[in-house]
Amino acid sequence: MDFLKLHTFVVVNAFSVLTVVGQLIALIVLMILLKEFFAKSETKLGKWIVKHGMPLMLLGAFLATVGSLFFSDIAGWTPCKDCWLQRIVMYPQVLILAIALWKQDRNAAWYIIALSIIGIVLSAHHYGEQLEAAMTPVPDANGVNVLLKPCDGSGVSCAATQIHFTFGYITLPMMALTVFLLNALTSAMMIVAQKRESLLDRIRNKLQR
């Protein structure tokens, strides 16, 4: 554990890079989703995302869970209230997606999109507070920005972590926001595909009568 703690900065950079990659993937998924919606037809890449949606979302949720546990239990950063709220809607996704993948239950996409939308709101609000605090700092006697301290007054201040807007904008809630956004978009694609398949099945049944 001590070895891992000594390499916290390396882990932070690794998750920051993954965050950037995740955001690029989210942009691509959004573009595909919009194209399929307006064109009323599927794309090859869209079909691939729908086919592999469950394991992809499971991977994202699992990495987010492992990352948050590393930062709290190994790096020693006590999560604030906002971080805990985001954990509440992130951690269950790992279990839900694992069971759904085992059972091949694509209806789980409805649960994931609901949890992810809540997570997007929570992490976006948390990130907005960080931006506000960074732009209008209020230093205490030790020069620490008091606005970056947890709102419930407990835990380690965000200013005490090694994530100070990595790459100019990435913080812990931004990492969470990226995963929530990815899972929400992927779930949306799977739901749209299910609706399309259901419509086609009804049309086929009418033609066969």
Image (tube, rainbow, N blue to C red):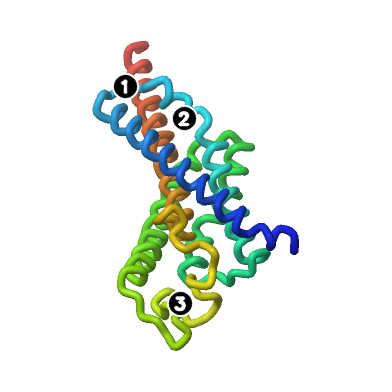
Q: Quadrant of the N terminus?
A: bottom right
Q: Amino acid at mark 1?
A: Ser
Q: Is residue 111 visible?
A: no
Sooner in the amino-acid sequence: mark 3 or mark 1: 1
From this view, report whether residue 18 is shown above or below residue 195.
below
Question: Residue 182, image x and y in percent?
Answer: 44, 43
Residue linked to disc 1: 41
Label 3 sits on a secondary structure element that is loop
Q: Position of residue 82 (x, y in %)?
A: 46, 68
Tell which circle, 3 or 2, labels the residue nearer the N-terminal end: 2
Can residue 198 be seen? yes
Q: Amino acid at mark 3?
A: Lys
Q: Nearer the viewer, residue 167 or 24?
A: 167
Q: Quadrant of the C terminus?
A: top left
Residue placed under numbered mark 3 in the picture: 149
Label 2 environment density (alpha carbons within 10 Å; few <14, some 14–19, many ≥20)? some
Q: Who's the residue at 43% across and 24% down the image?
A: 45
Find residue 40 and report its horizontal and vertical position in percent: 28, 24
Question: Could you tell whether 73 is left or right of 46 in the image?
Answer: right
Q: Residue 126: which disc? A: none
Q: Residue placed at 40% from the left, 62% from the top? A: 122
- Tell me the mark number nearer the camera, choosing from 1 and 2: 2
Q: Mark 2 belongs to which amino acid?
A: Ile
